[in-house]
Each structure stands twice: as structure tokens, then as C-alpha cells.
Amino acid sequence: MQRSIAALLLAKQLIGKRSFRFPLKHSENTMTKRKPDQTVLPGQLPLAFDVFAIDTPHGLVAAAGENELDAGIRQAVNGLLERCVAKGLSRERVADRLTESLARPVSKAHLDQWVAPSQADRRIPVDVWIALMKISEDFVPLEWMAMHMGRRVLTVDEALCAELGAMAVIDRHLKARSRAIEGQMDEKLLSQLMNRIKRNTK
């Protein structure tokens, strides 16, 4: 009897300290997954692995007389010019620097025509395309163009990092292959190879 009373008192104490809840049915379970903390401290780089992500033109609408490539080129150049303005380089100044770089007249009107969807018969020359990226130090149009060829544009340092990564992959493959070959060798074969090596070195 005393043991029963003691057990009841212990159960009462446990119930008072803990909060018990029956498990919810599958349809009543409203638990959501915890979202990762997306807070980035000042001076801290966000943990993202899209190192070579490309901001490409989207929502392309081709005007009459042009195809999607025409529209993409115009939008890429227009985006570059807008970023130039954001950096304090107006279209007039861009035209002046293009004139100096190419040694032929390039005006703001030319730039306006090359990016206007209504001017389908006016296309930006290749040399202007290249000079524009060099002047603005903005290579997003080049990256956009490479994307259509299934390629990526890397700087010299980025290419070295990519090469180092490829070498690491090859090294892991060679080590794995070496371990697999060693696993297939028995002690007798290994001894034969060692003896042959010794004879060749004499």
C-alpha cells in the first residue's frame, strides 16, 4: 500500500514538472521546417556557392523584324549602359570615349538606336560591343554571350582556381584507382613485382 501511494506521489510530481501532449495526427501536424538563418554580419560574405552565377537578360520580347538574339543583345547593351549611368558615366560620355577608342565618330544617338527595339535594322557593331565592355569594365554581355555557347567566362585567377579544382578531382580519382589495384594484388604477386624491380635496378 505504501509503495502504491509513493508511486502515485511520484507520478504526480512528474506530471507537474512536464507537459505531456498526445501526438498529432498526420493531417493535424502543422510543424514547419526551420528556415536557415539568412542573417549576414557586416563584412561577412554570405554562404553561397553560386560563385559563377550570371545575371542574364530575362523576359525577352522580340520586336517585329528581330529574333530573340537581337532582343537579347539590345537588352544586354541597354543594361550595361544603365549600369554606366549608375556609376556616373552618361551615354554622352560613353559615346565620347567610344569615339576616342575606335577613332571614328560614335554619338549618343547611335547608342540609343542600338538598344531601341523599334530600330531592328540598327545593330551594334562587334568592335563597339568589345570597346563598350572595356570602357565600362562591365563584362556581363560577354558572359551572356558565352552562356549561349554552353561556356563560362572566367578571369585569369578564376581559371587557376578551376584548374586547381580539376587537378584535385583527378588526384582523388588516381588515388582511388591505386587503392583498387592494390586490393586486387595478393602478397605473392606483390613480391614478384618487388623482386623484378630489384633486378632492374642492379
Image (tube, grey):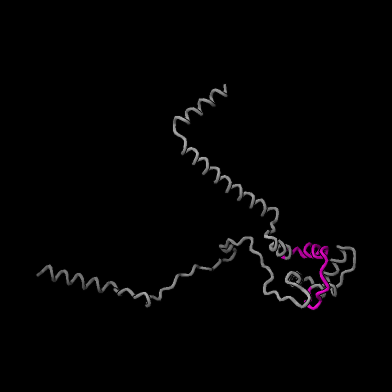
25 on left or right of 50: left
Query: Measured from the top left, where is residue 158 in percent x and y?
Result: 66, 54
Residue 159 in view = yes
Residue 11 x %, y %: 21, 71
Name, please, the residue furthest toward the right: 104
Q: Nearer the viewer, residue 154 or 175?
A: 175
Which residue is rendered at x = 45% and y = 70% of the image?
33
Q: Residue at x 45, y 29 (%)?
A: 188
- How far from the left and from the top, in percent, is residue 45? 59, 62
Which residue is at 61% across, 49% downward?
166
> In which quarter of the view is residue 150 placed?
bottom right
- 44 in relation to 172, above or below: below
- The magenta stretch is 115-140
Is 136 one of the magenta-colored residues?
yes
Q: Quadrant of the C terminus?
A: top right
Q: Position of residue 10 (x, y in %)?
A: 19, 69
Instruction: Say if 133 sits above or below 167 in the image.
Output: below
Please report the residue visible at 15 percent of the width from the left and 69 percent of the height from the top.
6
Residue 147 inside the magenta-drawn segment:
no
Q: In this picture, is 160 found above or below 7?
A: above
Residue placed farthest to the top in the image? 202
